Image (cartoon, helix red, strand yellow):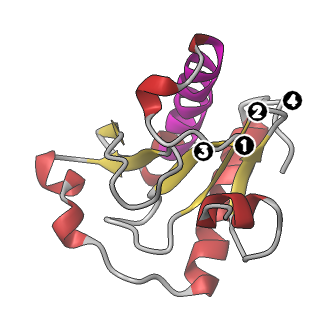
Amino acid sequence: MPSIFSRIIAGELPGHFVWKDEHAVAFMTIQPIRPGHLLVVPRVEVDQWDDLSEPLATHLMCVSRHIAHALKATYGSARVALMIAGFEVPHTHLHVLPADDMSDMSFLRTRMAESEALAREAASIRAALRSSGRPEAEF
């Protein structure tokens, strides 16, 4: 049975995407820790991140880095946090989110987000990615 992320990638479930390429996608999480929290996900289902091929793991980090620059430009945060937990969904995903201090990285702060808010955030992040010249990403 496909993971919920595979179903989002396939368009079976809604998602607010900020990045799509041949190997990875990034979309807003419906339970953000704070505004701008998104997930970078490989198209292929690999449960644990340490089982990713080296080229795919490298690609996910490169995508996350590009998105981090867009998040800084969009949210003006001091840093962009990157976390890999892997307990929620058995499909590797990198949490990427604006952060000003360690408390901004606590999963205890998650909340359900409104679809309209996620759509606005995704549009802002895509605009920042476009202005930074990311031709390899489809939006």
Residue 56's disc is none
Instruction: Give the mark nearer the N terminus: 3 vs 4.
Output: 3
Q: The disc labelled 3 sits on which kind of residue?
A: Val
User: Which contiguous range is marked in magenta?
Assistant: 55-71
**In the displayed structure image, the side of residue 46 where residue 9 appears, left or right:** right
- CA gap, disc 1 and disc 4: 19 Å
Circle 1: element type: loop
Q: Could you tell me residue 52's position as x and y percent?
A: 55, 25
User: Label 1, on which residue?
Assistant: 43
Instruction: Give the mark nearer the N terminus: 1 vs 2.
Output: 2
- CA gap, disc 3 and disc 4: 19 Å
User: What residue appears at the point 57 percent right and 16 percent down from the top-left corner?
Assistant: 58
Q: Could you tell me residue 57's position as x and y percent?
A: 55, 21
Q: The disc labelled 2 sits on which kind of residue?
A: His
Vertical placement of 95 versus 32: above or below?
above
- CA gap, disc 1 and disc 2: 6 Å
**In the displayed structure image, the side of residue 44 where residue 63 appears, left or right:** left
* Nearest to viewer (mark 1 / mark 4): 1
Please rate how many residues cluster around mark 2, counting C-alpha atoms within 10 Å: few if below 14, some from 14 to 19, many from 20: few
User: Label 4, on which residue?
Assistant: 135
Vertical placement of 83 versus 52: above or below?
below
